[in-house]
């Protein structure tokens, strides 16, 4: 049988929902008799959550086709994290070549892919699924999002609040919480080197409230609190020059950033799940976060919650933990222990049992 994931486009790195799809694809590819494919809609080349400019799209297309010319499409791998048994495809136009049948599974991974997967499932008779990793109404509007949720696809959500949203729309929905491999985000040392307050900046997504995060970072820098940020974006012009900024950090650098952070803070209005705070916690950082749905689903016992995005409240919460390294350490250790108890293996098994009907 074939299991086919449809992603909305290439991304510059396997983060967020892309990383979870890779995790499940790798697990499925190890099952005897299961052939796994990932299709990337090359007309939607993007960073996760950020559309690229026309110039960047042309550059990305040119680079992708040069890579394909050297390696051949069947062997093209956007990221090394994918198992070699997973077959990648750069165009949805090629999906017909698979000749899908009722024994196969087709999975939409974003709002942009739901209608395509529905049509393909109807045409081929295969099992159609909608993997809900966020409430993606930005850019498309809530009416269209709800319309896609009512399509005849079975749904899986990564967090209880997304499942409940789907239920409110009138559609049944399964729940498989995300899990992160703790081995990939090792616990760093506690001590003087863990001296930063840190945040992820995602200006392409308004609900991430990068404007608030920058104000918090600037306020911390003014108070002589070491501050650091990272993201796929260019360094924001309004970011205080005393704040360290890393653009597109490698996995090794990202782990180093987390391991040097005493506090990681998140000011999003909404998070589908909130993988970045999980990664930071696993590396030993205490977390301060808004009540954004995603982080609420796993962080009740160890995250310091701040309600809605608020500069003053966030600065106060961050500084309290920065001034109390032992309290920050205990929260991080509590969080790491809880997060490690739910492994990627368990998450992948649950996801697989659902889509394969086991």
Image (tube, grey):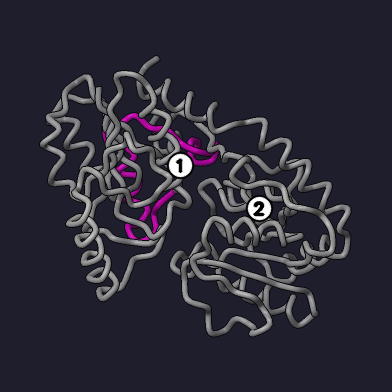
- Tag 1 residue: 20
Residue 344 lies in quadrant: top right
Residue 313 lies in quadrant: bottom right
Image point (25%, 65%), residue name:
63
Does residue 83 appear left or right of residue 106 in this picture?
Answer: right
x then y, percent, for residue 198: 67, 65
Local crowd size for mark 2, using a 10 Å CA cut-off: few (<14), some (14–19), many (≥20): many
Image quarter where the C terminus lies is top left
x then y, percent, for residue 82: 39, 42
Q: Which residues are magenta?
A: 135-164
- Tag 2 residue: 280
Q: Nearer the viewer, residue 266 or 179?
A: 179
Q: Residue pushed farthest top?
A: 358
Q: Secondary structure at mark 1?
A: helix
Image quarter where the N terminus lies is top left
Tally of numbered discs: 2
Image point (15%, 33%), residue name:
98
- The correct choice, above or below, for 208 with respect to 21 in the image is below
Does residue 105 appear left or right of residue 172 in this picture?
Answer: left
Q: Residue pushed farthest front?
A: 70
Image point (30%, 73%), residue name:
53
x then y, percent, for residue 14: 43, 51
Image point (36%, 57%), residue name:
11
x then y, percent, for residue 295: 62, 47
């Amino acid at each position: 049988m074939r299991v086919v994931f449809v992603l909305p486009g290439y991304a510059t790195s396997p983060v967020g929902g892309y990383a979870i799809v890779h995790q499940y694809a790798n697990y499925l590819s190890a099952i005897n008799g299961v052939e796994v494919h990932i299709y990337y809609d090359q007309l939607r080349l993007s960073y996760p959550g950020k559309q690229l400019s026309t110039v960047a799209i042309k550059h990305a297309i040119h680079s992708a086709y040069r890579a394909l010319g050297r390696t051949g499409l069947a062997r093209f791998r956007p990221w090394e994290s994918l198992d070699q048994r997973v077959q990648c495809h750069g165009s949805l136009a090629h999906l017909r070549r698979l000749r899908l049948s009722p024994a196969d599974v087709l999975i939409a991974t974003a709002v942009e892919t739901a209608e395509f997967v529905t049509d393909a499932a109807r045409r081929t008779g295969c099992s159609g699924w909608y993997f809900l990793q966020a409430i993606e109404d930005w850019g498309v509007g809530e009416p269209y999002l709800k319309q896609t949720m009512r399509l005849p696809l079975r749904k899986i959500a990564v967090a209880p609040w997304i499942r409940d949203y789907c239920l409110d729309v009138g559609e049944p929905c399964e729940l498989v919480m995300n899990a992160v491999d703790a081995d990939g985000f090792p616990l760093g040392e506690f001590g003087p080197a863990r001296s930063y307050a840190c945040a992820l900046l995602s200006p392409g997504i308004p609900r991430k409230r990068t404007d608030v995060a920058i104000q918090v970072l600037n306020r911390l820098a003014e108070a002589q609190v070491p501050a650091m940020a990272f993201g796929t974006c260019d360094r924001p012009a309004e970011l205080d020059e005393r704040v360290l900024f890393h653009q597109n950090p490698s996995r090794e650098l990202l782990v180093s950033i987390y391991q040097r952070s005493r506090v990681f803070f998140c000011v999003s209005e909404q998070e589908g799940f909130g993988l970045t705070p999980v990664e930071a916690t696993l590396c030993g950082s205490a977390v301060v976060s808004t009540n954004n749905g995603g982080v609420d689903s796993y962080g009740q016992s160890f995250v310091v919650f701040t309600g809605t995005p608020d500069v003053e409240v966030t600065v106060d919460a961050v500084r309290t933990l920065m001034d109390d390294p032992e309290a920050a350490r205990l929260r991080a250790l509590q969080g790491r222990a809880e997060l490690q108890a739910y492994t990627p293996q368990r998450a992948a098994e649950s996801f697989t049992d659902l889509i394969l009907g086991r």
